[in-house]
Amino acid sequence: MAIKRNTRRKIGFGFLILFTVLLCVIALPREDILLKKIGIKNSLKIRRGLDLQGGAYLVYEADMSQLEKDAKSSEVLKNAAAVIERRVNPGGTGEVTVRTANGNRIVVELPGVDNPDEANQLIGRTAQLSFFEVSQAATQGQDSSGTGVVPTQVSGKDVRRATVDFQQGATQPIVSLELKGGDSTKKFAELTTKLSQNGNSLVVLLDNQIVFGPANVQDRITNGKAQLSGDFNVKQADEIATLLNAGALPVPVKVVAQQTVGPTLGSLSIKQSILAAAIGLLGVSLFLLIYYRRAGIVAVAALVFYSLLMFVVIKLSVFTPYVIVLSLAGIAGFILSIAVAVDTNILIFERMKEELKRGVSRPSAYEAGFTHAWTSIRDANAATIISCIVLYAFGTPVIKGFAVTLGLGVVLNLITALTTTKVLMRMMVRSKLSATPDWIGAIGKVKK
Amino acid sequence: MNIVAHRKRWYTISACVLIPAAIALAVFGLRLGIDFTGGSVLIIQGSESRETAEAIAKANKAENLVATGSGQNQYQLRYRFNEKEDARALQSQLESQLKTKSFEIVRLDQIGPSVSSDLKVKAVQSLAVLSLVILIYVTYAFRKVPKKLSALSFGAVTIGAAFLHDALFVLGAFALLGHFAHVEVDTFIITAILTVIGFSIHDTIVVFDRIREKLTHNPKEDFEVTVETSLQETLVRSLNTSMVIVLVLLALFLFGGASTRYFILALLLGMISGTYSSIFIASPLLVSWNNVRQKRAKSKIKNAKSIKTKK
């Protein structure tokens, strides 16, 4: 039986080493090189919050007052958020975050953007594309009753795609529209037929900006392709195309909060915080080694394992819908979770010291120490986890980031205590390393 | 050193610190950042003198101009929220002026009133809910203590030490800092206070856990003795942990970025207060509470008995 247990323990230790190596691989900054060899193509970059990499933070409020009676405001808000996301992140590859909040708010985070005004231009516009038929009288300025401008059945909803093009030999850009098939193409064909026959003009407006016309339509267009040419430059043409492709906002929005973090501020903070964290970790390790002597090695190893584990979980969270974005508050939460991790170790060690003082053998001290310390660890950490849940539920976004890292840290710390600390300590009490009387620090008089 | 026996001493020390803190809060109030008041804040940086910056600020009717702590001729202008001017208008208006004086805008924050009142509400809400939840949790976790003790006392003292003692201490400090050093309280600082509370609770529970364990072994022992021995036994661990945390925070404070400096300061102050309150206030309070409770129960019995004998 004893042999079987020893083998089991050795296997346990082996797994621990393997797992640690795996963690190191994933935690490395250039892990994508190594991962490619196994065939995993994605790079695992930790998503940094705005306060760490600089960028713009915008909050929009949607005006729900004009909604139709049976429209669900949450659906509408989600739609609006999707439209906005398509506008600021057309390729889908950027690190942009667009999320809804509070029933009528949309929060947009644009890392790396130091001029939010341009983004604002795109986001704030409703972007309704409308096609109007203009009577000849109105074109000549003789329409006093205002009935000369008639809206048509064709609108932005019929557009499948918009691209910026240049006509041969022209420097003025145009926006080529590709209409959706079926009804849309038919409607447009009917409109162009009508216009080519009655001589009225076509005017196309994007919100209240004229993007085409007023101009006569010479032929019917049955292939669903149209070209908008107007008084716009390349940049504006690009904007129009982006807006058309993203779609119109279902409700108007206005900006209610705006914060920009300059890139210098952001990058300074992260460098300094990492330096500080490293120094802190070093100081803690020194203290543990000095006070708990050889047992301190177990504590430091557990700390390193825990940091690795945390790093890896944050990196891997990119694959889940709950991406953990690191922010300054998050780093602070992590640093405090280190303190909790150390506290756990201290609880165990002090408990073991008490047992050793009573004169029991080292393995027994280890068993008793762990068992008794566990209730304190469990209760105290449970309270911290509950606190984090409350903070996440009720807090502002900054508080949420903090709660996530602290809560995650506490959970991972419990796991670390049950694996690394336990395994390593179990080995240490049975090895020569703990043969000296002060292997776990000064114990004082031992009862014989 | 007997901690519980000298509890009146510790209560006095706390009162000497907390009463001034409360007064500072009442008199100076907290200097709230735009997170909670709404408005606009611009941080400009340039090589011109402070007078130039002040002139620009006055010309644009800024509410105040403060030098930010990060040196390098950085100044912070603050504006009350104005419906008519949005951030863009403000920025372009200032940009043209600033460029001529070789200032540049490093940062622009604008928080509308709906967002800021939202943040205010959320901050208060999270504090309120947290205290309630912890009260219930600790009372429930300690429901099996001997009848002579009140489980509620454990819960109440836990959050009392955390909220009324530690949070008050930190807030008082920031009332002073806000008045004399123009330090603002924003959501970061609120986060720090929530951390402090969380930690104080963690610390207190470890001690209470030890008390509970002793109670299961020796239920007949005098409660004061039980608490004292529990305290002495967990003292080393408490101090070690606190030392570790303070080390980490000190490193952050000295070497970390200027933007987190006051956040770390709030944490440091809170940790020190938290350690002190867990050891010298929380457990002695338990004893005081339960002593009063027992006296009341005894006098009730006495009165009942004397009524019986009178009859």
Image (cartoon, helix red, strand yellow):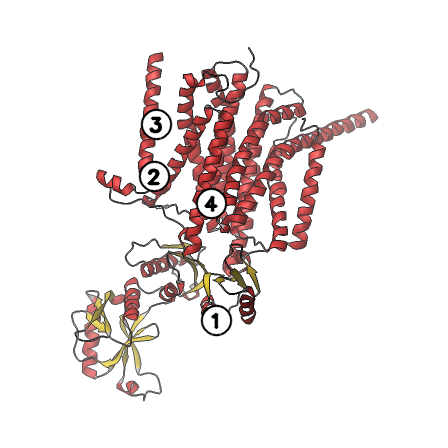
Residue B293 visible from this viewpoint: yes
Q: Which residue is mark 2?
A: A27
The answer to whether tags 3 and 4 share a subunit is yes
Q: Quadrant of the N terminus of chain B?
A: top right
State yes or no: discs 2 and 1 in contact (Cβ < 8 Å): no
Real-space Cα separation, disc 4 to disc 2, in angstroms: 21 Å
The answer to whether tags 3 and 1 share a subunit is no
Q: Position of residue B246 (x, y in %)?
A: 54, 38
Q: Secondary structure at mark 4?
A: helix
The answer to whether tags 2 and 3 share a subunit is yes
Classed neighbour count for the residue bearing mark 1: other residues with Cα under 10 Å, few (<14), some (14–19), many (≥20): some
| Three-letter residue code for mark 4 | Phe
Q: Residue at the bottom extreme?
A: A142
| Three-letter residue code for mark 1 | Gln
Q: Nearer the viewer, mark 2 or mark 1?
A: 1
Q: Nearer the viewer, mark 3 or mark 4?
A: 3
Classed neighbour count for the residue bearing mark 3: other residues with Cα under 10 Å, few (<14), some (14–19), many (≥20): some
Residue at image x 52%, y 37%? B247
Q: Is residue A29 left or right of residue A360?
A: left
Q: Which mark is residue B97?
A: 1
Q: Position of residue B42 (x, y in %)?
A: 50, 62
The answer to whether tags 2 and 1 share a subunit is no
State yes or no: discs 3 and 1 in contact (Cβ < 8 Å): no
**Chain ID for label 3?**
A
Q: Position of residue B216 (x, y in %)?
A: 58, 21
The answer to whether tags 4 and 2 share a subunit is yes
